[in-house]
Every structure is written in structure tokens, then in C-alpha cells.
Image: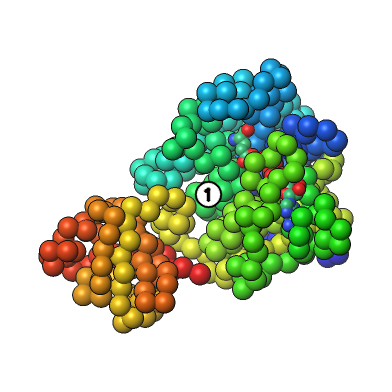
Amino acid sequence: MSGLRPILESSRRLVVKLGSSLVAPPSGRGASLPGLARDLAALDAEATLVSSGAVALGRGRTGRSASDLPARQALSAIGQPRLMRLWQDAFAETGREVAQILLTPDVTEDRARYLNARAALRAVHAMGAIPIVNENDAVATEELRSGDNDRLAAQTAGLIGADTLVLLSDVDGLYDRDPSEAGAAHVPFVSRESLGGYDTARMVSRSGVGTGGMGSKVRAAALASGWGVRVVIASGRSDSPIGDLLRGDARCTVFEARDERAPARRRWLSSRAHMAGRVHVDAGAAAALRRGASLLAVGVRDATGGFEAGDLLRIEGPDGPVAFGLASCSEETVRSGEAKIVVHRDDLVLEG
Ligand SMILES: Nc1ncnc2c1ncn2[C@@H]1O[C@H](COP(=O)(O)OP(=O)(O)O)[C@@H](O)[C@H]1O
Ligand SMILES: N[C@@H](CCC(=O)OP(=O)(O)O)C(=O)O
């Protein structure tokens, strides 16, 4: 194995995510948080951690289950300070401070909040501290809850302009079927073309503490690698998980990154989850969009969803999804014929 030395040593900004199964393993081996802290302190890259584990730690302290939203809120509120204490202790011998950053999904929906979160992360890095990011589950609601730290890790990588994202789990990467099934084969590399061929809905967690399973990691990898971020899924059950990857001592799955780095505004756009409207365009408009043009009102056949200027739209052509982007005008002005540009090309992200 050649190792990921070229990838990791050339990284300027690195995001590492740890799942609950590593931070608070129900049984068996978890991660060595001090070992990971030493690994990160030894790298030149600016490191950001996304750490799950608050709910699992809260469960361990109380013996209660996260059966409904209030229980989940309480368990995360109990577990989150414990989680931070684990990280403080882990980084103690490296001399690095850690900083808690709790995000809610609406950070990605609103541009000003997004930029504010980015500024906070930059300020923490400027002080030489390591941000420990998690979702703010204590104030999450059913509607406003991501519940998926793999996606949060990809969004964090997009937010800070990371070049590499490492998702550490209790498994050493993607397998061609559930690794508990006989004959499951490890997948060392996933090309951009093969990404769509994985049935992520079937790749569920078996640990009892993880939420998203391998499926949410593959979806997160698809999102981040589409922005040109190099994504690696590897096992965190080691005294030196990043060191193992550097040396080539550990198996992992590497996702091919799109050659071109997506600009910051596009990364923000495709981080957003809430689509407010849908427009159907004709074949000419679809082809023009694929060539990099803006969406003009003349190419719009139908507009739905009641969107306003600034809302996120899905754009569909005669053959299916083409792009998504920010509306420059309201649906009403498209319908009344007053609108000229419906989505400006700077606010467009092509699908696929
Ligand atoms: N095709 C697959 N390849 C690898 N792991 C898979 C696959 N399908 C399901 N899994 C399960 O996904 C788990 C990892 O997801 P999860 O338990 O949510 O971890 P984490 O807590 O690290 O986010 C693995 O331990 C494995 O049981
Ligand atoms: N935010 C939650 C973790 C959510 C989550 O995605 O967990 P996991 O699948 O273990 O990465 C917590 O800290 O408990």
C-alpha cells in the first residue's frame, strides 16, 4: 500500500470526523482520542474535528434512551460537556486548546449565518485552537435537525474550504455489501462515475449508537468530492489513525475528487437542504445551462413552489434534473412575464 502521504501532507485544511461508535463505543474498541490528537498536532495542516458522541455519552451517563425529541435534547445536553472534556484531555499533552462549535442546519440555509460560522471557525484557528464541531442537538427540532454528522462534516469542509475530509468510523471503508455479510469485499477507490451505482439507503448502521451508517458517509463523500475535496473513509480504531494512513498501514476508501475546486459561493449553495421551488425549462435552456449560461425567463416552461428571490430552486429539463440555484426573482414575476433572468450563472450548480 502506498499510503496517503501525498494527499495528507499536501493538505492545507483538513476536516476529520469521528462517529459515535468511536467516541462512545457500546462495546469493543473505540478510538484513541489522544492518539488522534498527537497525529493532528504533528501535521502542518489546519485541522478541524467534527465529533459525534454527545447523545451516546449522555445515554451512557443516564441509562436513558433517546426515545423522542425531548429525550434526545436532554441526552445531548448532558453528553456534550463530557464530549468536550474528552477532547480537552486528549489534546492536553499537545499543548493545543480545543474550541466547541455547535451548528444548526439553518447555518447553511442563510448566507449571513453561513459566513458568520465561517468567521468563527477562522477566528478559532487564528488562535491556534482546534475546533470541535457538532450539531447543536439540544436546541434541534424535528423540522430543524440534521441528525447526520457525516453531512455536517462535508458541510464543514465546504464552509472552511478544506482540501481533505477524513471520515473515521468503526469500519475501514466502504464494502460492496454490508461487511457482516459473507464474502463482502473492501472497495479501495470510488470513481466519480461509479458513485451513483451505490444503494446508500441499504448501508445502515449496526453499532446501536451510529445514526447514518455507511450510506450517509457515501452521500457526504459525494457532496464534498463534487466540490473538489479529497474524501477518505478509514477506521479510527487505532492509536494513530492518521499516522496509519500516512504510512500506508491501514486500508481505506478514497473517493475521486472533481478536478476543479468549487468556488465558496457554490459550495454554500449545494450545502443547502431546503429547496423552495422548481422550474421546468425547455431543451434549449437546459443545453445553455450546461454550457454555463444563466437561466433566462424565455426558457422557463413552468414554475412551482411559490418561491421568492433568494430561494433555492431545482431546475429540470425535458430529460430530468439539470441544476439548482438561487432565484434572482419571484415566481410571480416569472409568471407575469416581468422577469428576465431567473437564475444568474454565478448562482447555479449543475447536477451530476
Ligand atoms: N456497504 C457497507 N460498507 C461498509 N459499512 C457498511 C456497509 N453497509 C452498512 N455498513 C455499516 O455502517 C457502519 C458505519 O456507520 P455508523 O455505524 O453510522 O458509524 P459512525 O458512528 O462511525 O458514523 C459500519 O460499521 C457497518 O456496520
Ligand atoms: N450529533 C450527534 C451525532 C449524530 C450522528 O450523525 O452520529 P454518527 O452517525 O455516529 O456520526 C451526537 O453528537 O450524538
Residue receiving disc 1: 155
Q: Position of residue 69 (x, y in %)?
A: 53, 28
Q: Nearer the viewer, residue 190 or 200?
A: 200
Question: At label 1, which amino acid type do we have?
Answer: Gln
Q: Is residue 344 above or below residue 16?
A: below
Examine the rendering and report whether any part of residue 204 can be seen.
yes
Residue at the (64%, 45%) spot, across then down: 212
294 left or right of 150? left
Q: Secondary structure at mark 1?
A: helix
Q: Position of residue 207 (x, y in %)?
A: 75, 40
Rendered-image quadrant of the N terminus: bottom right
Q: Position of residue 9 (x, y in %)?
A: 72, 57
Q: Residues within 10 Å of mark 1 (few under 14, many from 20)?
A: many
Residue at the (55%, 64%) spot, across then down: 226
Residue at the (61%, 23%) spot, across then down: 75
Q: Nearer the viewer, residue 96 or 269?
A: 269
| Residue lying farthest to the top in this orientation | 62
Which quadrant would residue 82 be assigned to in this image?
top right
Q: Position of residue 309 (x, y in %)?
A: 24, 54
Is ligand 2 less than 8 Å from the beta carbon at label 1? no
Residue at the (22%, 70%) spot, across then down: 297
24 left or right of 249? left
Q: Nearer the viewer, residue 49 or 25?
A: 25
